[in-house]
Image: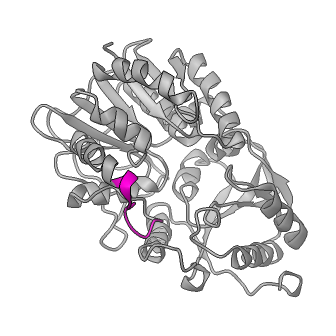
Amino acid sequence: MPGTYALVESPVQLLNVLEWAHARTAGGTAPGGTPPPEGAGAYPAAGDRAAAPGPAAPGAADAPLAPGELTVVVLPPRNATTRGQLLRMSGLARDEGHQLLWREVRGPAGPGAWPALARRLRAADRLVIGDPFSRWAQLLLAGSDTRRVVVVDDGTATMEFTAQLSRGEPLVRWHRAAAPRGARAALFAPVARRALRGLSPVEGREVEVFTAMPVEHPPGVTVRRNDLAWTRGRFGPPQITGGSDLVGTSLVETGVIHEDRYLGAVASLAAEYGVTRYLAHRKEGPEKLKRVAALAGLEIVRPDLPLELVARTGPIGRRVLSFPSTVVHTLPLVLRGTDSGVSVCEITDDWLTERASPRAGGFLAAVISSARGAHGLPVLPVPLPPPTAI
C-alpha cells in the first residue's frame, strides 16, 4: 500500500530513521554542502575516500513526511541483546507517532511472513533502507517499484556504501575479504544486481543518503547531513562523571582483529587514562566481557539503547575513548555543548587477523583521520600492555 516504509535490522538503524523522520517533519534538513552548525566541525576529505558532501541534486526526495505516514518494518536478528534494544527503540518510534511492524523473517516463521510484507512494500511511495548490504533489504528492494529511496546510516558502513555506489561496484561489506561465493551466492546474484540498480539514481528515481559520516558523493545522489537533532532535543543534557569511559567494539566478533591484542590494548588504555567503565557493544559475548573485567578491572556496562542515547541521557565520562567506529562521528554531535569529550584510539596493522579484508586497515585509518578532521578528535596511541595483561 502507498506510504513511506523503513526497513531496519539494528537499533542504530532505527535511531537514524527517527532522526530522518524528525528532519523531514521539522521543515527538512539542509543539503550536505551546507556548513555544519557551530562546534560541529567540518567534513574534509579523508585521503581519497571521504569527501565533503556536495550540494543536493535538483528534484531530490524532498517531500515532507505527513503525520502517521511512516511505517517502520523491524526485521530482528536472533541476537538477544540486539532484539532487546530494538524493542526499546520500537517503543520510542511509537511514541513519535510512527507505525511499527515487527516481522520475524529469519528462522521457521520467515516464509510465512515474507509474501505479505513484500506486497506491502511493492507499492510504497518511498523506501527508507537501514542497511543496503543486507540480503533481506535487497530482496525487498528488488521487488519494489518505488521511485524514492533513502539510505540512512548503519554506522561507518555508509562510507563504504557510497564509495562502492560511486564506482558502480557490487555491495560488499568492508570487513569481508571478497564477495560471497558458492551456489547460494550465485542464485542471489540477480537479486543483488537489481537491488543495486534500485539504489542508483536514474530518470524517475530519486536517491538520498542521510548520514552523519563523511562520505563520497555518488553522482545524482542527494547527500544530507544527519546532525542527531532528534536525539539532542529528546534527551539530556547528560550527567557527566569525573572518570573516563571506553567504548567496546565488535571488531573481534567480525574477525577483523585478534582478541588477545584487543584485550591487551583495553588493559593498557584503562591503566594509562583512568578508565573505569567499559560500554559493551551489543555483539560482544559474556566470555569476552569477563576477560575485559578481569584484565582491566573495569565495570562492564551493557547499554539497553544505542550508545548515542545512553551518552545523551548519562551518566557519561568526562572523557570517552573509542576505537575507530561509528561513535567517533556520532558522539561528538550528541555531546556537543557538554563537558564530555571523545578521543579515538589507534589500531595498528599487527592487530589484524589473517581473515581480515585487505581493505580493513585502510578503512579503519580513514575512520580515524576523518574523525580527527571533522570533529577535531585527539588520536591516542595505545601504550604497551601492563604486565598483568601479558
317 relative to 346, above or below: above
Percent x, y for residue 252?
Answer: 64, 67
203 or 21: which is nearer to us? 203
Q: Is residue 25 visible?
A: no
Left or right of 26 in this view: 150: left
Percent x, y for residue 227?
Answer: 46, 43
Q: Give the main secondary structure, helix, strand or loop, of the magenta stretch.
A: loop
Query: In the rendered view of the protein, which quadrant contains the N terminus?
Result: top left
376 relative to 232, above or below: below
The verdict on residue 377 being magenta is no
Percent x, y for residue 261?
Answer: 70, 79
Q: Residue 217 lies in what quarter of the image?
A: bottom left
Q: Residue 290 lies in what quarter of the image?
A: bottom right
Percent x, y for residue 157?
Answer: 44, 55
| The residue stretch that appears in magenta | 175-185
Q: Going 68% across and 49% down the picture, which residue do you hit? A: 282
245 or 388: which is nearer to us? 388
Task: Give the number of callouts.
Answer: 0
Q: Going 56% across and 40% down the picture, which residue do you hit? A: 10
Q: Going 78% across and 63% down the picture, which residue do you hit? A: 288
